[in-house]
Image: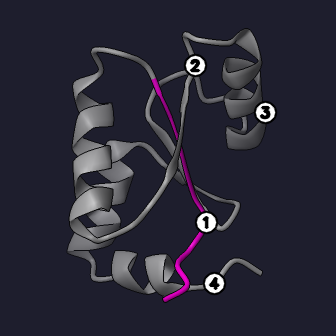
Amino acid sequence: MNMADVVIYTRPGCGYCTMAKQLLTAKGSQFTEYNIWSKDEYKQEMQSRSGGATTVPQVFINGDHIGGSDDLYALDRAGHLDALLAQNPS
């Protein structure tokens, strides 16, 4: 089964990052995780891709900026997350 291309920018010790990763895992989604503390390039890339966001996590699905953990959970509560995660990257 093909799945969406999911990228999440995180840092160690971030509870919201853990919650976002738990939700994605529960949905059966695989994701690429970038620890912004491990490389300055990751933090710069996250800020560039997200329009300047400095908080983690920042989640992208098929290249689209979803936002943080609260945004991800809101999408799920609204019933939209499963459809996004089922889309193949274009």
In percent of width and height, residue 41 lies at: 77, 18
Label 3 neighbour load within 10 Å: few <14, some 14-19, many 20+? few
The residue located at (63%, 84%) in the rendering is 88
Give the label on residue 36, or none.
Answer: 2
Q: What's under tag 4, amino acid-wise?
A: Asn
Characterize the local packing of mark 2: few (<14), some (14-19) or many (20 or more) Cα atoms within 10 angstroms. some
Alpha carbon distance from label 3 to label 2: 13 Å
- Tell whether label 3 touches label 1 (CB within 8 Å): no
Relative to 67, is 80 above or below? below
Q: Is residue 30 covered in magenta?
A: no
Lower sequence index among marks 3 and 2: 2
* Amino acid identity at mark 2: Ile
Q: Residue furthest front?
A: 1
The disc at residue 5 is 1
Q: What secondary structure is found at the residue carrying circle 4? A: loop
Q: Are marks 2 and 1 in contact (CB under 8 Å)?
A: no
The amino acid beneath tag 1 is: Asp
Q: Would you say residue 2 sits in the magenta stretch?
A: yes
Q: Quadrant of residue 36?
A: top right
Name the mark on residue 48: 3
Q: Spatial distance from mark 2 to mark 4, Cα to Cα?
A: 26 Å
The figure's colour scheme reads one colour
**Viewport quadrant of the C terminus:** bottom right
Q: Give the percent coordinates (x, y) of residue 6.
A: 55, 59
First reached walking from the N terminus: tag 4 or tag 3 = 3
Q: Quadrant of residue 48?
A: top right
Q: Which residue is mark 4?
A: 88
- Residue 17 is situated, as x and y percent measured from the top left of the image, at 33, 34
Of labels 1 and 3, earlier in sequence is: 1
Position of 55 compared to 36: left or right?
left
